[in-house]
Amino acid sequence: MSVLVVGECLVDVVERPDGSVVEAAGGSPANVAVGLGRLGVPVSLVTSYGDDPRGRLLQDHLLASKVVPQVHFAPTSVARARLDQTGAATYSFDLRWELGELDAGTAKWLHVGSLGATLAPGAAVVRRLVEEVDCPVSYDPNCRPSLMGPDVREQVQELVALSDVVKLSAEDAEFLHPGLPHAELAARWLALGPTLVVVTLGADGADAWTPEGHLHVDVPDGAPVVDTVGAGDAFMSGLLWSLLEDGQDVRAALRTASQVARRTCERPGADPPWSL
């Protein structure tokens, strides 16, 4: 196994501007795992969902995308995504997150994030795994303010300190540290231990910081944007894929990540590409 992803897998109930409703597999860590599987990376997802129609939808989606699921059975979680006229999504959640004890096994990389890394009681299990693994760790806070408690900023900072690669959106940065320039936030987080901090900026591309300095990539050209559902997760998949393939070539990894995210935005829902 190359990558172990741990986090929520849920059903996105997407309400489109024309009033139509579509149900699809989602959840930030699950989307990252799917993106990796479609890009040919051996990947397993530790997650939770039920033995019910929506749970089977999730299981089929993971298997079809070459993800090996490790399931702790619980009621299947649901996220309701409402799209505006630009394709941007706002979310509400019905989510439970419980796990048994975890073992990273032979994983060469561990990725954690979003609600799975901060929502009790499962977050404590994820935290212990991050502390114990002997492989690189990536983390995406992917903040959901309506479900995150008052201590989430402390939780995020502690996970940042245990990670090698951290990716967050500009919205995450504003929620966690309102008004703080991204460069200053990145400097603080690099001082905690990561070697790469990336802030995605939507249509403005992405900024990244390493101990050697700052990098920026623009969004590549492509077909018109349909919606942005899953774009940040697709970016994360592309980033990890490239880092696993090319090692320390951070600029190349950022370009690949941007291409994967751009391709995902050209189709409805969190539907990352199978190749570039």
Image (spheres, helix red, strand yellow):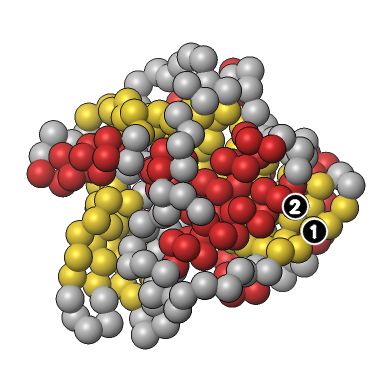
- Residue 253 in sight in this render: yes
- Residue 141 in sight in this render: no
Dot 1, crowdedness within 10 Å: few (<14), some or many (≥20)?
some
In the current view of this chain or complex, which residue is farthest to the left? 53
Q: Residue at x 31, y 72 (%)?
A: 82
C-alpha separation, residue under disc 2 versus residue under disc 1? 7 Å
The image shows residue 77, relative to residue 159, as above or below, that is below
Total number of numbered labels?
2
Left or right for 227, reference 19:
right
The image shows residue 193, relative to residue 236, as above or below, that is above
Q: Nearer the viewer, mark 2 or mark 1?
A: 2
Amino acid type, callout 1: Leu
Residue 215, which numbered label?
1
Provide the secondary structure element on which disc 2 rests: helix
Left or right for 130, reference 195:
left
Q: Which corner quadrant of the image does residue 178 belong to?
A: bottom right
Q: Earlier in the sequence, mark 2 or mark 1?
A: 1
Residue nearest the viewer, comparing 172 with 55: 55
Q: Residue at x 71, y 64 (%)?
A: 217
Residue 251, which numbered label?
2
**Is there CB contact under 8 Å for labels 2 and 1?**
yes
Residue 231 x %, y %: 48, 61
The image shows residue 40, relative to residue 91, as above or below, that is above
The image shows residue 223, relative to residue 103, as above or below, that is below
Residue 180 x %, y %: 75, 66
Amino acid type, callout 2: Arg
Residue 250 x %, y %: 74, 47
